Amino acid sequence: PERESVPEEIGMTEIFQVVRKAVKQHGCNRAVLVGHNAHFDLGFVNAAATRTDIKRNPFHAFSCFDTATLSGFVFGHTVLAKGCELAGIEFCNKAAHSAAYDAEKTADLFCLMVNRYKSLGGWPNT
C-alpha cells in the first residue's frame, strides 16, 4: 500500500533482471524459487511470464523449495506461524499475510532448516 503499482510487464522484467544478475553472479543456470507453498507461487510467476511474453524467465520451470513441506518434515507442522514457533523464530500473527512479512519469515525458516541440516553433516564436501 505504500508504493505505486506498475504494469505487470515492468514489474516482472525488473524482478527477473535482479534474479538473473544473482544467478550469473553465483555461477548458476537457473534460480530456484523458495516459498511457503512454493509450487503455488511458482505457478503465478510462470503465468505472469507467459502473459507478459517474457522469454528469459530465470526461475527453474518446475523445481522449487517449499518451506511448508520442509517444515512438515522437520517440525511436524506445515503452517508458517507454527513452523516458526517450533523453530524459535519470532512470529507476529497481526503482521502475517503481508507479502513482505511472510517472505521474510519464510526465508528465516528456510535458512534455519538448511543450516540445521548442514550442521548435522548434510552436504559434505566432495
Image: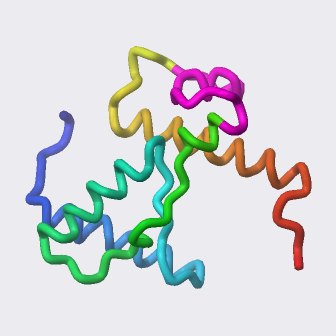
> Is residue 75 positioned above or below 32 on the image?
above
In the image: residue 87, left or right of residue 1: right
| Residue 111 point in image, percent of width and height | 66, 47
**What residue span does the magenta drawing correspond to?**
73-91
Quick check: is 77 in the magenta stretch? yes
| Residue 114 point in image, percent of width and height | 72, 51
Quadrant (top left/top right/bottom left/bottom right) for the C terminus? bottom right
Q: Residue at 53% across / 35% down in the picture?
A: 105
Q: Residue at 56% across / 31% down in the picture?
A: 78
> Is residue 109 positioned above or below 18 on the image?
above
Q: Residue at 55% across / 55% down in the picture?
A: 65
Front-most of residues 63 and 22 = 63
In the image: residue 58, left or right of residue 26: left
> Is residue 97 positioned above or below 109 on the image?
above
In the image: residue 126, left or right of residue 2: right
Please identify the quarter of the rendering in which residue 62 is found: bottom left
In the image: residue 99, left or right of residue 31: left
| Residue 119 point in image, percent of width and height | 87, 50
> In the rendered view, how is the structure colored?
rainbow
Quadrant (top left/top right/bottom left/bottom right) for the N terminus? top left
Quick check: is 97 in the magenta stretch? no
User: Number of numbered discs present?
Assistant: 0
Q: Residue furthest top?
A: 94
